[in-house]
Image (cartoon, rainbow, N blue to C red):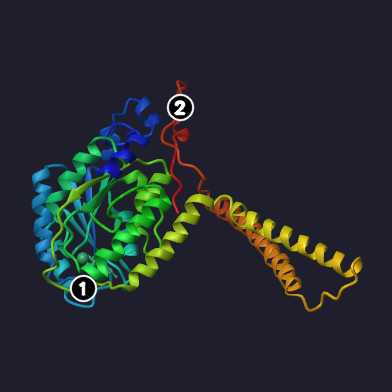
Amino acid sequence: MAWAAKQIRRMPPPGPWVPVPAIALSRGVSAMDVAREDGLDLSVVIPVYNEEDNVAALHAQIRAALDALARPSEIVLVNDGSRDGTAAALDALAASDPGLTVVHLRRNFGQTAAMAAGFDLARGAVIVAMDGDLQNDPADISLLLAKLDEGYDVVSGWRRNRRDKWLTRLVPSRIANWLISSLTGVKLHDYGCSLKAYRREILRDVHLYGEMHRFIPALAHWAGGSVAEVAVSHRARTAGKSKYGLGRTTRVLLDLLTVKFLLSYSTKPIHVFGPPGLLAVLVGVGLGLYLTFVKLVEGYNIGHRPLLMLAVLLVLTGAQFITMGLLGEIQARTYYEATGRPPYAVRRIATSRTPQPQEAPHHHEG
Ligand code: UDP
Ligand code: MG
């Protein structure tokens, strides 16, 4: 918890449990009213892929946890193209529970995409995600909500006593958590834990690709969200099989590279490629001038010198780096201007001017 505590001090929590634009509030609408436009406090979103032996127990446990909370809530189960009896089992559950929505994807799109599908459908002011294999305990949802109530935007579960294989899971996960924490600056013990709670508006600013669901806390932090961590329980898988092996580590590392780049440089790619490019060109030109001097003034042959090759290599790669940075700049402009997505995130706007309805800050979808 020491890590999380440090994080907490750096980012003061923004306020009430349910975040609303200040303009909406100034029109005499309470925070709860706005958040409840859809009538729900909470959505529990779960991707499932070939979990036929888990879904019934899963549903029963979440139902029990939500009933205990006694808040307006819903369950969204996303069937990620399962090829076993999961679809039929889910349909039967949906028929019996009006608070359950089941989304069947056309094929297996992967856990992250399935989660994104659930997030898009979820109507709650707060969204809780978790795994569908019962390794997470739905009873822990209340712990996450309590932490969120303290004013955080994202609360991440930390599987303190994780019940997974040591060599293929725990060791890579330790390294990955350390790497992700130091590169993104958001220090969490357990990025891989799917059990997390998000304020809905934070997810609206976060777009998920690849294996990126685990980076949501880092992406949310970029958008100015505050992130906290609570210890949750973890259970061994009792039914079905894990969908991942060691291969995921490579994909997570590559995604980390992407996230790091996007977070730090997506609006200024020339700042990444420019400096090494300039340095290479400078050194290359310097070497070239020296060789010219050797040839013209000292009269030696330079055609056989490795230094000549190095000079040529440096000038060429340097020029390519700079060009790459410029192309990146064009890409960045195309992206931000075509999507209308701003390179910033507004928490709230304060003004004593009476706002016109069309002035209310709106989110860019897409
Ligand atoms: N999952 C999914 N689509 C996939 C792979 C996994 O929806 O392509 C779901 C899976 O059913 C489970 C969650 O994602 O609910 C986590 O998967 P798993 O338990 O296999 O991962 P592990 O806990 O072993 O990391
Ligand atoms: Mg699992």
Quarter of the image for the N terminus: give it. Answer: top left
**Place of residue 166 in the rendered image (x, y in percent of width and height, measured from the top left):** 21, 67
Q: Amino acid at mark 1?
A: Asn
Q: Is residue 360 above or below residue 99?
A: above
Q: Is residue 207 above or below residue 297?
A: above
- Taking depth in this image into account, of 285 and 75 the one nearest to the observer is 285
Quarter of the image for the C terminus: give it. Answer: bottom left
Q: Is mark 2 within 8 Å of ligand 1?
A: no
Q: Residues within 10 Å of mark 1 (few under 14, many from 20)?
A: many
- Taking depth in this image into account, of 267 and 202 the one nearest to the observer is 267
**Place of residue 327 in the rendered image (x, y in percent of width and height, measured from the top left):** 64, 60
Residue that numbered label 2 is attached to: 355
Judge from the rendering whether residue 210 lies leftward or rightward of residue 280; answer left or right: left
Q: Residues within 10 Å of mark 2 (few under 14, many from 20)?
A: few
Element type where label 2 sits in the image: loop
Which residue is depicted at the point 18% across and 47% down? 73
Residue that numbered label 1 is attached to: 50
Q: Quadrant of ligand 2?
A: bottom left
**Place of residue 321 in the rendered image (x, y in percent of width and height, measured from the top left):** 65, 62
The image quarter in which residue 47 lies: bottom left
Residue 79 in view here: no
Judge from the rendering whether residue 299 lies leftward or rightward of residue 93; answer left or right: right
